[in-house]
Image (cartoon, coloured by chain):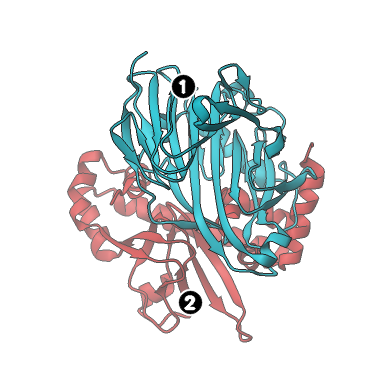
Chain colours: A cyan, B red
Amino acid sequence: MKTRHIEKVTQPGTPHFVGDGFRVHNFIPGTSTMQRMDPFIMLDYNSKYNFPATDQPKGVGVHPHRGFETVTLAYKGRVEHNDSSGGGGVIDEGDVQWMTAASGVLHKEFHETEWSKKGGEFQMVQLWINLPAKDKMSPPKYQAISNTQITKVALPDNAGELEVIAGAYNGHKGAASTFSPIEMYNLRLKKGAKTQFTFPENYTTALVMVEGDAKVNGDTEAPQDHFVMFSNDGDTFTVEALTDTVILVLSGEPIKEPIAAHGPFVMNTQEELIEAFQDFNTGKFGYLED
Amino acid sequence: MGLANFKKHLIEKGGLSEDEFARIEPFIQIRKVSKNDYLLQQGDICSHSFFVEEGVLRLYDLSEDGKENILQFATEKWIVTDRGSVYFQQPSTYYIDAIEDTVVVMLDDAFVNEVVKVNIGFRKQNEILLQNHIRHLYKRISLLLGASARVRYLEFVNMYPDIMLRVPQWMIASYLGITPESLSRVRKALAEENFKS
């Protein structure tokens, strides 16, 4: 067991709007690159933000994706989504939606209608996870993982609880199936409690400080809404909660394949990117009314 | 400020070497224009052509009833201007504005002359670009006069592959000379033919 040190702690930068419904800080690629963060290629964090009540739900209109998976974690608020193959649903507080865009979907995401009418605090993470080349053109699918389906593991000494979304923690498996090894947990650690995680040294590993403040590896403070990026110089790190915390823990094996990315398409070559645009323009992603 | 696109343009289309590009680099003028801001407004005399390093511009005029008619979009590596206003030094009847935050390289005769000083062949290359532009305009007129909405759309996305994701649909409809509803119908019909769920 060898300490995995922190590479950097990033404070939330100037937020930007995705559509009119998601006010996000970009952490991946952020100041890094898709290659460095492999297999995580994009992470937008909507820190708590109060949306006023409205009859016109805010969100993002119809747009395509190809070549990767989008994972949406709803911490506060509710999101409704629809796609070109007729699918759709609501991501409620505590739920995770794992969408495999793969060969291509057209979808839209809006604040859920009834939630919009009341408005309120909204907090989400949207993460894009790359797919290995062999799976990029596989059929799209959804894993709608409701909070009740998420494996919950009580931490020793009443330290708190770990929600295992993907991967496995001490033999407790997460509900999400993945195309490459991914560990994804929500750590709910009580004030003063401490825990540690061990992942293979080569895994890209990071934390999103969703709620509260913590100390990492005994010496570095990780305040709320910050992003903690680890080096690959060891396998184990510790987290000590300075307040009650919720922390998104991410660790994934790098896919190590070439990345050709443009907007909502992430492929391996420039030719595949051009094909993605052509397919989108000629209706191969289907049709969805705005 | 990276000028990767402009550099590529001068080397690949203009015939310059890396070394020649380095020599004209000090003469390059850039301008940043925020989304919705203008590079040209009706009544101005247009003094430059605008090479898009990054972003999207559009060239349009207004009908008598105030409707916008889009003549051209310019995404990365495109050049847009009111050539008539520049050449004849007459007030423009057009507008050029930014659809995204955009960075342009400002091109004028003085700059072209500097480039020609380092590479005499550039004048010919520049003329080829002009002739190519004229050929493109002929084709555009033909499509507007004779082609179906579907053919106009397919030609358009072939020329601007990423534009459907960057520009509102009503602007694309304006460029194609069709209604937004007609554009929707074309896209829907293509999806019905090509989408395999």
Give how far across and how far down residue B39 sits, in percent.
Answer: 39, 71
Above or below: residue A197 compared with residue A146? above
| Foreground of the two, A94 or A100 | A94
Q: Quadrant of the N terminus of chain A?
A: top left
Read off the chain for label 1: A
| Marks 1,2: beta carbons within 8 A | no
Q: Which amino acid does label 1 sit on?
A: Lys
Above or below: residue A205 compared with residue A235? below
Any mark on residue B75, and which?
none
Residue B156 relative to residue B5: left or right? right
| Foreground of the two, A93 or A233 | A93
Q: In front: mark 1 or mark 2? A: 1
Above or below: residue A248 compared with residue B160? above
Residue A154 relative to residue A109: left or right? left
Residue for badge 2: B94
Q: In which quarter of the image is the C terminus of chain A?
A: bottom right
Please say whether residue A269 is visible from this viewpoint: no
Residue lying farthest to the bottom in this orientation: B64
Q: Which amino acid does label 2 sit on?
A: Tyr
Assign a secondary structure to mark 1: loop
Give how far across and how far down residue B95 sits, in percent.
Answer: 47, 75
Give how far across and how far down residue A231 sits, in percent.
Answer: 34, 26
Residue B11 relative to residue A180: left or right? left
Q: How crowded is mark 1: few (under 14 residues within 10 Å), some or many (20 or more)?
A: few
Q: Residue at x 65, y 36 (%)?
A: A98
Q: Which residue is drawn at 63% across and 43% down?
A: A94
Please say whether residue A232 is visible from this viewpoint: yes
Residue for badge 1: A256
Q: Could you tell me how many numbered marks the image carries?
A: 2
| Foreground of the two, A161 or B80 | A161
Q: Which residue is drawn at 36% across and 73% down?
A: B86
Give how far across and how far down residue B46 sits, in percent.
Answer: 37, 75
